[in-house]
Amino acid sequence: MTSSAKIVLAGVGKSFKAAGGGEIVAVSDASITIGAGEFVTIVGPSGCGKSTLLYIIGGFVSRSSGTITMDGRPIEGPGVERGIVFQEYALFPWLTVEQNILYPLRRRNLPKNEQKAEAARLIEVIGLRGFERRFPRELSGGMRQRVAIARTLAADPDVLLLDEPFGALDAQTREIMQDELLRVWRATSKTVCLITHDVTEAIYLSQRVLIMSARPGRIIDEVRISLDRDLPREECETSAAFAEQRNAVWLKVRREALAAATR
Amino acid sequence: MVPERLQPWLKALASPVILVLLWEATVRAGLVDAELLPSPTQILVALREIGAAELMPELAATLFRIAVGFALAAVFGVLLGSWMALSERANGFFYPILASTYAIPKSSFIPLFILWFGIGFWPIVLVVFIACALPVVVYTFHGISDVPRLRIWSALSFGVSGRDLFWSVQLPAAMPEILVGMRIALGFAFTVAIAGEMIVSTTGLGKLIFSYGEGGVYASMFAVISVLLVVAYLADLLFMAFMNHYLRWLDRGHVSGGHA
Amino acid sequence: MNMTARLRGAFAASYSLILVCLLWEAVAGAGLIREVFLPRLSVVLERLFAMIADGSLIEPIAVSIARSAAGLAIAVVVGSILGFLSARSRIVDLLVSPLLSIGQPLPKVALIPILILWLGVYSSSKVALVFITCVFPIAISVQAAACAVPKILLWSSRSLGASEFDVIRSVLLPASLAGLMSGLRVALPLALLATFTAEMIGGGGGLGAALMYSQRLFDTPTVYAYLLVMLLMGIGLDQLFLRLRHRLLRWDEEK
């Protein structure tokens, strides 16, 4: 299982100034420990601040309170060790698939031929051989997200952060991409933290699911997922264990969603 | 009937061709005084009479000034616009100055510049420069400011910042806007350069136009003006072609990036 | 916001302009540049106030504004009709749109000698230039706005029982009006610019001609004074336009 803590949040909070004066508390008092090599998902109703929390972990947004560390050192800003995949605007549209993937590789100070070789390998891994010279606008949504993930992997980060990466995809593509992500995780043993509002996705992918309340977002619960991961997807998702854990989490999230709607 | 591929061409050319034919017909029929409005064929004849030897040097001089002024303005405009987009202080400083130059007709600086630099190269180049700089600055400013924040963050997560971020992400992302601004600036360049040469009337195509006008050789005057308009149109066409090639990655459904 | 806060805000917003003015005064006053090239700002302002006081500004300004307004008015009428009809009728579109896209990037100032030939050196040629310059952006803008009305909006208003006339009146006209406003925003400064340019090149009264006249006399302070007047007119007109737009288009606020 997890040996050491990779990312630790203690009492992290974030508030913004509201337009008409006053404050909006997006995240309040989040304390999370993500172990090295762990796959953790944060679920919660829309607008609960889970994206904000992810951005704080990524170092893009500063926290208002609390501490956050990675490998024991405080997180002060974005860094190559924490790669991120967004739902939209992930790729650089003016670069081809290959150029996009080469982008972080160029900055890793590898010799040129190694860069090209690694890019080719990643393109093969995501199954897009032959599409190297295409521009993102020529690709489907699923293909673009594949390239985005490959590109983030090219930077070789220790931690992978994903912000609802499959939210813009249709249901079938989403399932394929989820399996891709699992495959990559198992092959590289990186630490993964994924944000989603899709509870089924959370149960299927992660070892631990953290449930966030409606705004101001607090981590109100944590569920350790136990499933027989050797089962093929069809059997896994239709098993009783899956349904039971999914329902448990879903009910909690729903309660929060309703609470937010009636506020 | 008409093959599909040719249809857009037909649509684009039908109207102008009809206009030209009507023009020719009206003059030939004597409905219009040919002195005041030569027919297209008369203009072409006059053009041949003027000859390349007389026309080309002046045309080259005018185009050269436009090119230099435009190029300087493009570089300066992109740098200033970027600086203003990235620095609140720079924006606060330069914005009032730029906003006030906006309302002044740039060609009105020609007399001043002639006073300062004498007739010839510099007054026109400078006037083209200040006419072109403003649209490039404004569009660059908007282009750089509108780069989606998630795109910047993606770059940051690759350890990129500062100059690398600017040249490898912000500038390319802003290019669609910047090129639109440059296209507008190109139109201004021609307008201001021609206005300047007509005010001065001792150099370039403006000189030719005025001397033919004064001399009553109207067909030649029309001829030079036609050349001017055609060259300006071709310049715009060329720029658009360049733009479309350079921006072939652009997803035209969403101008600023969309779901890529 | 009280008065001092307002003033402080205005100062902060334009301190660079004030800096430029001070720099101007200092450089010119120090005699670094010859008087005839760069007179002191104070001298220019003095001249400007003198010109305002003795009323010599009134005629050129009135003449230039009248020409711009006349040309613009005709451009609005013709441009709106052309733009609207191009959006509604495919034949009109076929005839008009190619001419609009060819004409738009052309430097209309090149036509000034022709216009002077036909219409003389006084107001008619200036009004004609303003018209030719402004009709393109207006027509293109109106056409784009009328075309952009989503078909769904048209269908749903028809299905609510509106007649063809009602649809035009309640959906297409407001959309076209919005297009007219954005075209006008572009055309307004163009109108002034075209007038000044035509006057500088061809003479015949107005601010542009006055500016050229004082330049020929090497009366540089007056030249600068006229430039300031043009600047202020441009700014004033833009402000006026924004207020007008706000009144007419309350439902479609621009940022």
Image (spheres, grey):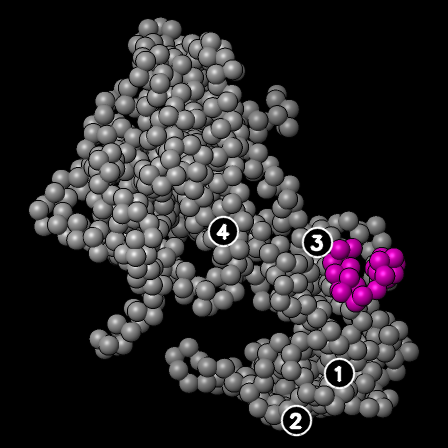
Q: Amino acid at mark 1?
A: Val
Q: Amino acid at mark 3?
A: Leu
| Residue C223: x %, y % from top left | 24, 43
Q: CA distance from mark 4 to mark 1?
A: 48 Å
| Disc ID at residue B77 | 4
Q: Which residues are magenta?
A: A98-119
Nearest to the eye among marks 1 and 2: give it.
Answer: 2
Q: Earlier in the sequence, mark 1 or mark 2?
A: 2
| Residue A39: x %, y % from top left | 79, 81
Note whether C134 is above or below C28 in the view shown.
above
Which chain's residue wears label 4? B
Residue found 43% across the figure and 20% down from its top: B224
Instruction: Give the residue at mark 2.
Output: A10
Instruction: Give the residue at mark 1.
Output: A40
Could you tell me which secondary element the residue under label 3 belongs to? Answer: loop
Q: Nearer the viewer, residue C223 or B171?
A: C223
| Residue B70: x %, y % from top left | 50, 41
Instruction: Give the residue at mark 3.
Output: A95
Note whether A49 is above or below C105 in the view shown.
below
Callouts 3 and 2 in the same chain: yes
Residue found 75% across the figure and 83% down from its top: A40
Q: Residue furthest front?
A: C31
Which chain's residue wears label 3? A
Magenta-drawn stretch contains C211: no
Residue A121: in sight, yes or no?
A: no
Q: Amino acid at mark 2?
A: Ala
Q: Amino acid at mark 4?
A: Gly
Q: CA distance from mark 4 to mark 2?
A: 47 Å
Callouts 1 and 2 in the same chain: yes
Q: CA distance from mark 3 to mark 2?
A: 39 Å
Callouts 3 and 1 in the same chain: yes
Magenta-drawn stretch contains A115: yes
